[in-house]
Amino acid sequence: MNWEQLLSDQRLGEKRQGIEKGRSAFEQDYDRIIFSHPFRRLQDKTQVHPLPEDDFVHTRLTHSLEVSSVGRSLGKKVGQVVLERHPVLASGYSVHDFGAIVAAASLTHDIGNPPFGHSGEDAISEFFISGPGKEYKKHVNELEWADLTHFEGNAQGFRILNKERYQGLKLTFATLAAFSKYPRQSIIKEQIKSRCSQKKYGFFQSERQIFETIADQLGLNKHENYSWCRHPLAFLVEAADDICYHLIDLEDGCRMGLVSYEDAVELFAGILGDKFRPEKLKKMDSVNEQIGTLRAIAIGELVQQCTTHFLDKEYDLLQGGFDRALTDSIPAANTLQEVIALSVEKIYRSRQVIETEIAGFEVLPGLLDTLVEAVIAQNINEKGLKRHKAALRLLPSETLKDIETQKGNTYAVIMNCVDFVSGLTDRHAISLYRKIKGISLPNS
């Protein structure tokens, strides 16, 4: 792989545009995402703590903005050295382009996540594995069934970014590839678990050809069975996410009283090493200020460590030989594992989080049961009860239009129902479920 191809500003189905003075194509990507409807919905989607009332606790939206900020720093730091190493790039690219690509991709990294966090992915999958949705297996092929029974937020994100009705998105190939942490389909011939890029999958069958077009244009190294090497900048997007959720979940847990102040300080100190200055903390009156300051300094330290590691591995990254998370191989890696262990014990298994996960396993399958049954009855069988017709009216007009266009294709129409349900905010999903099940009525 080579940087000149990897930094392509081509957009799907469009001719390359001339450079807009003062704003690159990659900066345009960022702006398109910020003003998009799918991005706006992240403000009411669970990060870890459901429907938070505490001002300090993060939603998917604030998390995504923070990941994007860290991603921009990583991209610019890496870009500065890459441009020095590859002088041929200097005439067409700047450090700001590297920063903008990673920032834009980071901004979208959670855009495909359903309501109720990662448990929402499991709830959608279980609807098809063991719920009423299992009856649709006979109508789809093996790969399509794998998409439905192993619902993946990363693949849903790639689908959203390439859906026709979001005409304002159409991001550059470089940004779309940097977004794609798992550049493979749901089933591959041989899954190498040691390769972090193969832990999950990154596109559904409905977007397989789109991903192949992007990968070919960028020159991504291809494996067998619709599986590719990552775009090098995808490692920076992953690192930005890892840095933020490790440290900020720890900060949130401390603020909410789930993690002790002493444990949090000890872990932040482990990341900072010789740079930890406990005497400076004593000058701050507020515990929240102390924890916030430690978190900020720790982020800076991890950014530097990840940048150094990326640049040390640049050749291997371009050859497709390096395939580990950057945060697994830096000096602070062991401390980050301690952060994860503590977070699992104290935060991710807290009663409030578990209660929300259980709710997700009721709400999402309940919505899918009603909507998919209605769509299949009306669109595939061309018949349906009055309740089916009433349920269809709950779907947005653009979704109904997509379903009508894809009439007779069971996989395609089911995927449109999944688009709608997975795109709901937490509150909207709960409200709609209560109304459908007769638990509450509109305006009640």
Image (cartoon, helix red, strand yellow):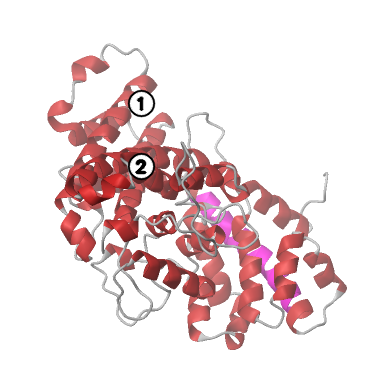
Q: Amino acid at mark 2?
A: Gly
Residue at 48% in and 74% down: 209
Residue 15 location in percent, x, y?
A: 52, 60
SS state under label 2: helix
Instruction: Identify residue for label 1.
Output: 292
Quadrant for the C terminus, please.
top right
Q: Earlier in the sequence, mark 2 or mark 1?
A: 2
| Residue 334 visible to an observer of this rendering | no
Q: Is residue 79 left or right of residue 24?
A: left
How many numbered marks have been drawn onto this rendered protein structure? 2
Q: Nearer the viewer, mark 2 or mark 1?
A: 2
Q: Where residue 38 appears, x then y in whole percent?
A: 59, 51
Which residue is pictured at 34% across the width and 51% down the height? 238
Note whether residue 120 is visible. Answer: yes
Residue 357 lies in the magenta stretch = yes
Task: Say which residue label 2 marks.
Answer: 99
Alpha carbon of mark 2 to alpha carbon of mark 1: how far? 25 Å
In this rendered view, identify the residue nearer to me: 245 or 9. Answer: 9
Which region of the structure is painted magenta? 354-376
The answer to whether residue 425 is above or below residue 23 is below
Q: Is residue 422 magenta?
A: no
Residue 351 in the image: state x and y as whole percent: 48, 46
Q: Residue at left 74%, top 67%?
A: 401
Q: Using the image as rendered, state which of residue 312 and residue 23 is in the foreground.
A: 23
Observer-nearest of 1 and 369: 1
Give me the disc on residue 349: none
Label 1 sits on a secondary structure element that is helix
